[in-house]
Image (cartoon, rainbow, N blue to C red):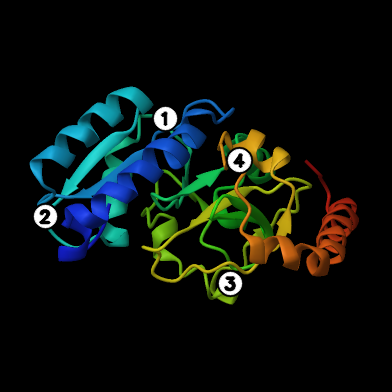
Amino acid sequence: MGQGTRGIDPAWLGPRFDIFESVCAPSVLSQTAPDIEWLVFFDADTPEAYRLRATHLAEEFGFLPVWLSGEFTSSVAAREVVALLRPGDQRVITTRLDNDDALHPRYAEIVQDELGARTNGYVTFPFGAQLAAGEFFARLYPSNPFLSRVEAAQGEIGTVYAARHWLPREHRPKRIWTRHPAWLQVVHGANLANEVRGVWIRPSGPAQAFGVDAGDHEPAALGRARRRVISAVSLVGALSDRLAPRRRKTH
């Protein structure tokens, strides 16, 4: 759930666990694709109260908690993934997901469908959404962290964490354009890097897709700004619809 002393500070863990439990975990549980194994990495020095909470959540949402006494690295991720492989597995697909973010219910299904029988490569979804202060924002983010990688199961596994998502030229991911936001970033006070960079959209669609009750609160400043961004929202919608037919598949 975090690295260093900050990651085991109860003041940091409390809000993170709340978002994980209400936003992140339900989105993985609702995935339509079968045969998903979900690993959640925790600091081994996590306070006992949160270790117990993690254990209860693992039972509720069906993920495998991994307790790390050292730094989280791609080799650590690879070790845990390899341990889950079964005889006869031909390939392995790994997807990265932060504990305060969420995936659209069809995310994994679309990834598997787009990759087909491939055993090498990356895919990413440029169109997603952000949730901040009870409001949803559409965002186009070509080099986002929601990256997936497929590899041959018999070879040396690197996992998606071996790639730096902000440098897409390194791995040339296939970009999958969807008419719906494929992922959701939760922007809050404890984020290290996220900030609202999208444009406001009506909450009904993303709230239903991600199962998030954003509430009816609307900051006054945002309400005044809505008139200025509504045309941009329409442009984003038109752009995503226009680009989708140019790809081989739309979703």
Of callouts 1 and 2, the N-terminal one: 2
Q: Nearer the viewer, mark 4 or mark 3?
A: 4
* Residue 50, x across and y down, in percent: 18, 41
The residue wearing badge 4 is 104
Q: Residues within 10 Å of mark 4 (few under 14, many from 20)?
A: many
> Which residue in the protein does label 1 denote?
88
Distance from disc 3 to disc 1, alpha carbons, whole Å, reads 31 Å
Residue 59: % across, % down: 28, 24
Residue at 90% across / 57% down in the picture? 242
Could you tell me how far apart the alpha carbons at marks 3 and 2 are, in whole angstroms? 31 Å
Asked if labels 4 and 2 touch by Cβ distance under 8 angstroms, the answer is no
Of the pair 236 and 109, the residue shown nearer to us: 236
Which is more foreground, mark 1 or mark 4? 4
216 or 146: nearer the eye? Answer: 216
Secondary element at image label 4: loop
Q: Which mark is residue 69?
A: 2
Q: Which residue is mark 3?
A: 168
**Alpha-carbon distance for marks 1 and 4?**
29 Å
Q: Amino acid at mark 3?
A: Pro
Relative to residue 143, is residue 250 drawn left or right? right
Instruction: Kindly identify which numbered label has been placed on residue 244.
Output: none
Instruction: Find the distance from the CA under tag 1 to the CA under tag 2.
Output: 32 Å
